[in-house]
Amino acid sequence: MDLQNLEWSYEFILNNCDDDLRVTLIQECSALGSVGRTGPMAFYLLANKVIKTQANFSHNIISSMLLLSLKHFEGESVPDCVKVIRNMLTMLNYGHAKFDHTPPNLMELLYDIFLRGSNKQFVSWLQQTIDFRPEIISTPTQLFTEVSNYYDRIITKHDRVWIPTSSSKKKSSFIASVESELKQLRQELEANVSGQVLDKNRNGKYVIDRTPPKEGEPHERVNFKGFTEKWCSKCPKGGRWGNHSTEGHDEWYKEYRRKQDEKKARAEASENSNKEEKKDEKTSTSPVPSQPSSMESTTIAQTPRELLRRTYVSFDDSDSEHEF
């Protein structure tokens, strides 16, 4: 931390934040009283948010790097791949004395990216260089220079054709997916800075945010996907952010139960219909055995009450709420 940062005023820091971050800082500083509305305290709270966000952001970038491959770029363009990796290293603060977030096995990760290519000549050259001349590609800059130069020699020799030619349609779809992931990472970064909870479970799905708004904070917000969320304190497990407020919980739950009852009724009606169809098929294919004369009077009997009872729908009257 630079000492000059501690000389920034409370107003100076707020004026250099966007609207959402400014509101969050004002609320957190105000909760600390007069001590909180000072430059050093505002800077401390701001830096704390950046540190937490940076850790999650760095983890996501390194995870993406593990899956990156030269085949993911149209025509397996080495210059395009180098450009993307340079941007990743910049976001990880590569080379910074204090805030370098790159993993200790960075070079192995970079080697693997270029080794996952289709050009056998290029892959063979790189593997031999790693095995017998590692000193000339021991840093990212050296590696980028060497792979770019060798790529240029190959495409110049083959009339600027990288062999084999990859499918442009497949690469375009991947680039679109990468752009989508980068957009989501930016949205997560903004959401984390503004105080929203964006943890994920083992399946990669976002965990429900059950952090209640603090005293004085609004009970309605716009999440990182652009949808409006409302706080409901009546929902199970202490409340949650979702599609209805505390005041609208009872009406939402009544509508939810109605839809669940309709869904269950349709399922049971469909099940009964299938049973009747199977029963009719069995009756039509099975021969009817002859009956003694003493039993003929019972063949025209009325339908038993037990059969009539099957026309009623049994609904679940549990009051447990659905996790949406």
Image (cartoon, rainbow, N blue to C red):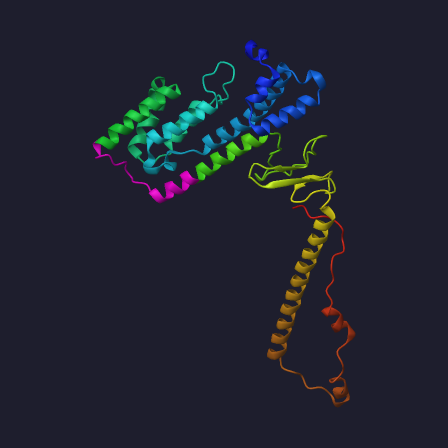
Residue 207 among those drawn in magenta? no
Towards the viewer: 290 or 298: 298
Q: Name the residue: 51% across, 18% down.
A: 99
Q: Name the residue: 25% across, 32% down.
A: 155
Towards the viewer: 109 or 6: 6
Q: Residue furthest top?
A: 3
Residue 271, position as x, y percentages in the image? 65, 65
Q: Which residues are magenta?
A: 157-176
Q: Quadrant of residue 7?
A: top right
47 sits to left or right of 87: right
Towards the viewer: 292 or 274: 274
Residue 106, position as x, y percentages in the image? 45, 23
Q: Quadrant of residue 191?
A: top right
Q: Quadrant of residue 42?
A: top right
Towards the viewer: 115 or 147: 147
Compared to residue 136, the image places residue 226 above or below, namely below
Residue 171 among those drawn in magenta? yes
